[in-house]
Amino acid sequence: DSGVTQTPKHLITATGQRVTLRCSPRSGDLSVYWYQQSLDQGLQFLIQYYNGEERAKGNILERFSAQQFPDLHSELNLSSLELGDSALYFCASSEQGGGPQETQYFGPGTRLLVL
Amino acid sequence: AQKITQTQPGMFVQEKEAVTLDCTYDTSDQSYGLFWYKQPSSGEMIFLIYQGSYDEQNATEGRYSLNFQKARKSANLVISASQLGDSAMYFCAMREGMMNTDKLIFGTGTRLQVFP
């Protein structure tokens, strides 16, 4: 158990819908990262938050947004869902979010299926 | 451009034997970190081992060791005394230090199957 929690574990929804994925980082970690794992794209970085502020953006679609709250939990909002958004979405956390030596610990993931 | 390459889509190893999973990387940074993660069929990503670019010694964590060859830009994972529970996908990842971004870049993974 990494200490990172994600809810829900599974989500099935229809095209055009909107969903919210939730993540609680390890106790004391200030940085939260979101990654998407799909069969065709592999593991891709979406976005990072550090202590409530957006720090880095990756290949995140405009239909997706995220935020980190004062209690440091984070939510990833996916809207106008398409079939291709079906994937495993991971949240990871690290202590500070700085430096190449810092390990990111991953949550169990949310498996999203868009029908 | 920063990149991680894992050339072995799948590997087989017999229980109790050692196995090496290959990883090469490409970066222009002097400061970077290399990580290996394990993803069992249940889906979670489990951190295994870390190697920093300035580390003199190869990292070890229990049965896992990292064969770090900086000049060749390789960071191979060695699993000794394989167990059935080691069957999983293994991902090599890199994090650069100078680009002001903390994201991990992942390889495509190697599926390891341990047989009795």
Image (cartoon, coloured by chain):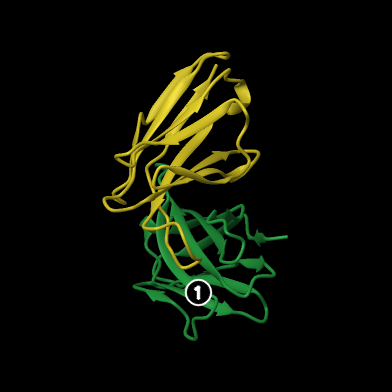
Chain colours: A yellow, B green
Residue type at mark 1?
Gly
Residue A111 horizontal/vertical position (percent): 45, 31
The residue drawn where x is 36% and y is 36% is: A69
Tally of marks = 1
Left or right, B49 with respect to B54, comes to: left
Left or right, B93 with respect to A19, comes to: right
Q: Quadrant of the C terminus of chain B?
A: bottom left
Q: Quadrant of residue A103?
A: bottom left
Q: Is residue A86 visible?
A: no
The residue drawn where x is 40% and y is 66% is: B82
Q: Which residue is mark 1?
A: B52
Left or right, B28 with respect to B78, comes to: right
The residue drawn where x is 57% and y is 13% is: A16
Q: Is residue B105 visible?
A: yes
Residue A95 horizontal/vertical position (percent): 36, 57
On what subunit does the disc labeled 1 rest?
B
Pick the residue in front: B6 or A85. Answer: A85
| Depicted A60 relative to depicted B6: above or below | above
Residue A41 horizontal/vertical position (percent): 64, 41
Residue B51 horizontal/vertical position (percent): 48, 73
Q: Quadrant of residue B68?
A: bottom right
| Depicted A20 relative to depicted B68: above or below | above
| Depicted B92 relative to depicted B75: above or below | above
Pick the residue in front: B78 or A70. Answer: A70
Q: Residues within 10 Å of mark 1 (few under 14, many from 20)?
A: many
Q: Quadrant of the N terminus of chain B?
A: bottom right
Secondary structure beneath label 1: strand
User: What residue occupies the far right of the structure in this picture?
Assistant: B1
Pick the residue in front: A22 or B101. Answer: B101
User: What residue occupies the far bottom of the structure in this picture?
Assistant: B56
The residue drawn where x is 52% and y is 68% is: B33
